[in-house]
Image (tube, grey):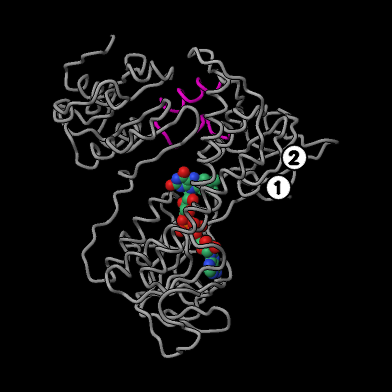
């Protein structure tokens, strides 16, 4: 334990807030709560920072960056640079990734200590609507925030052995580069690993039950990603339901219901993540749940007045920045501020593959459903017309969805580095900008942000560098 009071020696302590789980949602609530003067205890059984820092966002993005360097080395001659790609030193990659994580971990530990948050290391359990038991001790709080997050999910009968059939947790620590891999699930995690592994020389096949990769994105983005992946030699089977896996002499044989069989060194199961809530006393204390998720209202309140839940444990978008926002919202509410509920459509979403897929707002299909076909206007701006994208030799598009004569309600982007453009896109969506207003703003030349400007110029009826 570090920071704040020593609960072990102070049984009378009643904290303003006790938080169970120190991942993105939990630690954000702790930091904001402490900032607002609340006394906070943060209980964590593993490492402060949770999935995102240790097994999610940060290590995967480090791998993706190493993959980008590998690709750039292989393609260096296209830019007139003489370089030879000799291969991947997987230990070196892990060292780089682990150093990034370790640095951020240290910084976060320091931050939590400096805000006088009482950090309690241990596995906790909700013992009453106002207490958590940990290390044989009861920690009382006027309010409890449940933030125990999520873990990789599998399907019945598919056992993850950590060797030939692995989850993302194992994939991040893999001490070898397989020759081939099947990835079950074409969502964000599956697509990001496919991208990394292909750059590292792995023969990759994605098996996805739905009709498209990244199926939560606008269909246009999915199609552009599929085209780019096809070009990169990343194979994928769509509308293919997994039916079984068997061990072969050297690896696995994955079968699908439509009769396909794919042999590979290993199978990565990336079909989603399930909430961590079993056996933690939630139901026993009357907290309403649905399939393991803790049910919350728009202020992240559960049905038990002294208990809130944030992050992946709640059935909202499973993203670190959503966890941060939900944690901050609860802390501010408990401190007596009046935070506004989160507009989940306004949350930026990025898949950091090569190419990147980034979006905010709603898809064209959803806009048509909400406003009717005749009220929805779209425009697509091809990155071929964007100088900086040309310099980077990236292909892709920015698609805007607008309600006729109204605001832009969806921005959908595919291309290298498009994740960095989502900051402006989210301001456009969340400030309900009109195309003409954005068209008025000057974008620096040559940047990829110009493509966003150009798309809005086109939507405002005055395209500049757009080809019909
Ligand atoms: C491979 C991968 C890549 C990802 N990439 C991104 C990305 O690029 N961007 C993004 O926004 N999101 C990404 N995510 C999602 C992101 O990691 C999660 O949305 C985020 O970590 C959720 O935060 P959380 O606080 O709800 O849960 P978690 O981060 O899972 O934290 C929960 C914490 O609670 C602790 N805990 C659980 N039970 C107990 C208990 N009984 N007692 C004490 N402590 C307990 C756990 O040890 C854990 O530290 C990725 C996830 C994965 C798996």
Q: Give x and y (percent) for residue 376.
A: 25, 28
Which of the pair 314/370 is nearer the observer? 314
Q: Is residue 308 above or below residue 394?
A: below
Task: Please give the label number shown on residue 139.
Answer: none
Provide the residue designation for mark 1.
158
Residue identified by numbered label 2: 245
Residue 22 relative to residue 96: left or right = left
- Closer to the chain start, of discs 1 and 2, is 1
Q: Farthest residue in the right direction?
A: 249
Answer whether residue 225 is magenta in the image: yes
The front one of 372 and 129 is 129
Say whether marks 1 and 2 touch (CB < 8 Å).
yes
Residue 423 image point, x, y percent? 30, 38
Where residue 5 appears, as percent x and y from the top left, is 42, 81
Magenta stretch holds residue 260: no
In the displayed orientation, state which residue is furthest to the front: 82
Query: What residue lies at 42% left-to-right and 34% top-to-bottom?
Result: 217
**Which residue is nearer to you in this view: 253 or 22?**
22
Indicate whether 13 appears above or below 42: below
The C terminus: image quadrant: top left
In the image, what residue occupies the spot 70% across and 49% down?
160
Q: CA distance from mark 1 to mark 2?
A: 8 Å
Q: Assign a secondary structure to mark 2.
A: strand
**What percent of the width, then of the height, locates residue 255?**
72, 34
Please tell me whether mark 1 sits on a helix, a strand or a loop: loop
At horizontal 35% and vertical 18% (from top left) the residue drawn is 383
Find the magenta span and give its range.
208-230
């Amino acid at each position: 334990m570090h920071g704040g009071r020593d609960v072990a020696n102070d049984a009378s302590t009643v904290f303003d807030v006790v938080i169970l789980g120190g991942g993105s949602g939990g630690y954000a609530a702790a930091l904001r709560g402490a900032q607002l003067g609340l006394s906070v205890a943060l209980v964590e059984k593993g490492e402060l920072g949770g999935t995102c820092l240790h097994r999610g966002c940060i290590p995967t993005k480090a791998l993706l960056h190493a993959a980008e360097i590998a690709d750039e080395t292989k393609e260096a001659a296209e830019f007139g640079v003489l370089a030879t790609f000799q291969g991947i030193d997987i230990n070196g990659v892990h060292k780089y990734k682990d150093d990034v994580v370790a640095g951020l971990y240290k910084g976060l530990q320091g931050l939590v200590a400096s805000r006088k948050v009482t950090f309690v290391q241990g596995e906790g359990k909700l013992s009453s609507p106002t207490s958590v038991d940990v290390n044989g001790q009861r920690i009382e709080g006027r309010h409890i925030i449940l933030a125990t997050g999520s873990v990789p999910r599998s399907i019945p009968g598919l056992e993850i052995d950590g060797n030939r059939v692995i989850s993302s947790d194992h994939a991040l620590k893999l001490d070898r580069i397989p020759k081939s891999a099947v990835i079950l699930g074409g969502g964000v995690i599956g697509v990001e690993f496919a991208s990394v592994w292909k750059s590292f020389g792995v023969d990759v096949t994605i098996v996805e039950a739905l009709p498209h990769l990244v199926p939560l994105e606008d269909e246009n983005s999915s199609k552009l990603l599929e085209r780019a992946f096809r070009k990169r030699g990343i194979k994928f089977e769509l509308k293919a339901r997994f039916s079984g896996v068997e061990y072969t002499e050297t690896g696995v044989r994955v079968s699908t219901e439509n009769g396909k069989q794919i042999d590979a060194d290993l199978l990565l199961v990336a079909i989603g993540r399930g909430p961590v809530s079993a056996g933690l006393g939630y139901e026993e204390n009357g907290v309403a749940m649905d399939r393991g998720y803790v049910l919350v209202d728009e202020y992240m309140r559960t049905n038990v007045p002294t208990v809130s839940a944030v992050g992946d444990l709640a059935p909202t978008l499973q993203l670190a920045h959503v966890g941060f926002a939900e944690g901050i919202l609860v802390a501010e509410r408990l401190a007596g501020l009046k935070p506004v509920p989160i507009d989940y459509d306004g949350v930026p979403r990025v898949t950091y593959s090569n190419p990147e897929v980034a979006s905010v707002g709603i898809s064209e299909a959803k806009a048509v459903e909400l406003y009717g076909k005749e009220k929805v206007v779209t425009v697509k701006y091809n990155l071929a017309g964007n100088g900086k994208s040309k310099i980077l030799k990236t292909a892709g598009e920015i698609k805007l969805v607008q309600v006729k004569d109204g605001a832009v309600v969806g921005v959908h982007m595919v291309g290298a580095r498009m994740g960095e453009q989502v900051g402006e896109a989210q301001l456009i969506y969340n400030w309900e900008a009109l195309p003409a207003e954005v068209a008025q703003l000057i974008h620096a030349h040559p940047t990829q942000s110009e493509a966003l400007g150009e798309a809005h110029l086109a939507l405002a009826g005055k395209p500049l560098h757009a080809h019909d």
